Image (cartoon, rainbow, N blue to C red):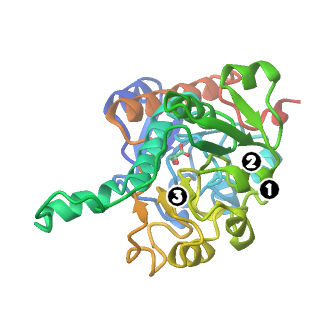
Amino acid sequence: MKPRVFVTRPLSEAALELLSSTCEVRSFPKDAAIPVSQLAEECREVEGILVSSARVDEEVLLAAPRLRAISNCGVGYDNIDVEACNRRRIPVTNAAGSLEETTADLAFTLLLAAARRAIEADRYVREGRWDRWQWGLMHGLDVHHKTLGLLGFGGIGRPMARRGLGFSMRVLYHARHRADVSIEREFHAEYADLKTLLRESDFLSLHVPLTPQTRHIINGKALGLMKDTAVLVNTARGPVVDEEALVEALTNRRIAGAGLDVFEQEPRLHPNLTGLANVVLAPHIGSATGETRVRMATLAVRNLLAMLAGERPANIVNPEIYS
Ligand code: DGY
């Protein structure tokens, strides 16, 4: 009998076909987060779940006695209660390796757009307000030869460093674990403590997972240490930044600007965010290119199939269940 699996949103067709070749597949038909109670209901008989930004918590696990594999179709897996999975010895995988370059592309896009006021400029021209060349029109910030600060220096932080090097930037990073000297050399990246990173970065880009340690790591105090010419870029997770404090810092020009792809209560925004000209906003599209979506879904399917076949998958995030 084919194992039953549930897919939490309609993903790329080719990947779902691959899954259907060996599994009995049911999918949530909407491109939206399935409510937890509905997910729990859907998972009563399943052995595997392919998750895309749905919450998988104790309620879902309790409802799913046969569950033995969870494949997350994204690199961040804060939507999954991994501790609860560990208690049940359920392997969990992510899609690391499929989307990092693409997300770094968007992070750098936000950085450039905020620095050079690209969205404001576009609006200005479209609205027919441009009547002559002006010396003083829309001065932005130079990016080249500035200091790019990276909070987090993993799968997305490193490609971001490479983009910075292409703009002749000095690259500083802070991470929980300092990288090997060979990696630092490869990326021409200097390790800094968090305070130094905050003080010296002209552009600070966030690439940490959301954990209890990183929640609100960028708070009022951290923003207070940044240069008043600095730009913050967040393509990681919204709650890494205290959004209330950020809105205050942007309003008072404590920092110069921000480029945000993720938000504390997304898709809800802080009410004062949309009124600010010095922030560029995007709807959590870090990995949203056609090619990368196919890569993510295919990898997530392969991880799920490996787990269902009893193999140890390449992208395991809770290897401790095997010890
Ligand atoms: C990720 O991979 O974590 C993206 O944010 C999609 O959820």
The amino acid sitting under disc 3 is Leu
Q: Which residue is mark 3?
A: 39
Up-down relation of residue 49 to residue 304 (above or below): below
Q: Are marks 2 and 1 in contact (CB under 8 Å)?
A: no
Instruction: Find residue 195 and name its label.
Output: 1
Say which label, 3 or 2, has the lower sequence index.
3
Q: Secondary structure at mark 3?
A: helix
Q: Tell which of 108 and 225 is nearer to you.
A: 225
Residue at 58 percent of width and 40 percent of height:
75
Q: Nearer the viewer, mark 3 or mark 1?
A: 1
Residue at 45 percent of width and 80 percent of height:
272
Up-down relation of residue 263 to residue 317 (above or below): below
Q: CA distance from mark 3 to mark 1?
A: 42 Å
Instruction: Find residue 85 and name its label.
Output: 2
Q: Secondary structure at mark 1?
A: helix
Say which label, 3 or 1, has the lower sequence index.
3
The amino acid sitting under disc 1 is Lys
Up-down relation of residue 28 to residue 169 (above or below): below
Tell me if mark 3 has few (under 14), some (14-19) or many (20+) residues whose alpha carbon lies within 10 angstroms of its own.
Answer: many
Q: CA distance from mark 2 to mark 1?
A: 35 Å
Q: CA distance from mark 3 to mark 2?
A: 16 Å
Q: Position of residue 114 (x, y in %)?
A: 42, 55
Q: Position of residue 226 (x, y in %)?
A: 67, 61
Q: Tell which of 305 and 294 is nearer to you.
A: 294
In the image, is 51 to the left or to the right of 173? left
Q: Position of residue 279 (x, y in %)?
A: 44, 64
Q: Tell which of 149 and 217 is nearer to you.
A: 149
The answer to whether one can see residue 2 in this image is no
- The quarter of the picture where residue 191 lies is top right
Q: Nearer the viewer, mark 2 or mark 1?
A: 1
